[in-house]
Image (cartoon, helix red, strand yellow):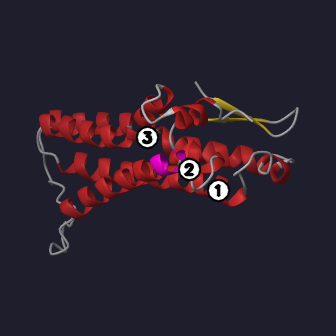
Amino acid sequence: IDAKVTFSANTHILLPEDTFSFFAFVEVLSLSFLVASLVFCIQVTTLSLLMADVIDTGNDQNPLGIPASVEWPVRASQLLALFIAVISQMDVACSANLLYNVCKSTDLNEGLTLTVGSGRTKWFGSLFSRFLEGSLGLTVTFILIMRADTVRDVLLNFTAVEFVSGVDNAVFYMAKLNCFGRKVKTDAENLVI
């Protein structure tokens, strides 16, 4: 379920229910912002460490370690996993869609100042962090999947990155269940302006 942001009677922008939405609308010195920041740092750090671990800077010919020839079931599973990764990576698509909707709004300046704590910088910071995490997740997914030389490795690598990429959604759901306190739950339920 998406939260609706209303800039005027004619303009509605749907926000995804994930912790990146906290960046746009809660006070910087709040527990909700801290939770979102921690989730973002955990995701980006984990994905960056994965990428740093698999890239071989000493190998000029093949720094990603992608095997030249693998069995056809492995190649088929790689292509299928990459297709699923691209269509299921919602953070990149959501950030692009939100950016488009905000930029086409005639009430942008008014809309971004309707709530306490919101503003243009925080709104675009939310979009940027969502896009960065999603793009990094897709990049790491591509590298890990293409490095795999068995179908099992393809599936395990794909699942691992999808898990890391989904932490923001899981934590938001936990916030709605009151796992982080009443204030964070209220923020998660009241993203509607």
Structural crowding at the residue carrying mark 2, measured as other residues with C-alpha within 10 Å and reported as few (<14), some (14–19) or many (≥20):
few
Disc 2 element: loop
Left or right for 72, reference 36: left
Residue 14, how many percent across, how many down? 67, 34
Q: Does the magenta stretch include residue 35?
A: yes
Q: Does the magenta stretch include residue 131?
A: no
Tell me the number on the disc at residue 168: 3
Q: Tell me what residue is drawn at x 57 percent, y 34 percent.
A: 188
Residue 186, how many percent across, how many down? 59, 32
Q: Label 1, on which residue?
A: 122
Structural crowding at the residue carrying mark 1, measured as other residues with C-alpha within 10 Å and reported as few (<14), some (14–19) or many (≥20):
many
Q: Earlier in the sequence, mark 1 or mark 2?
A: 2
Q: Which is nearer the eye, 174 or 178?
A: 178
Q: Nearer the viewer, mark 2 or mark 3?
A: 2
Whether label 3 touches label 1, CB < 8 Å: no
Q: Where the N terminus falls, by quadrant?
A: top right
Q: Distance between the residues labelled 1 and 2?
A: 14 Å
What's the amino acid at mark 3?
A: Asp
**Can you say whether 27 is above or below 191 in the image?**
below
Left or right for 31, reference 161: right
Q: Which is nearer the eye, 43 or 86?
A: 43
Q: How far apart are marks 2 and 3 (CA)?
A: 17 Å
Q: Label 2, on which residue?
A: 30
**Quadrant of the image occupied by residue 149:** top left
Residue extent of the magenta highlight: 32-36
Q: Which of marks 1 and 2 is in front?
A: 2
Residue 189, how many percent across, how many down? 60, 29
- What's the magenta bit mostly, secondary-structure-wise? helix
Q: Which is nearer the eye, 113 or 182?
A: 182
Q: How far apart are marks 3 and 1 (CA)?
A: 18 Å
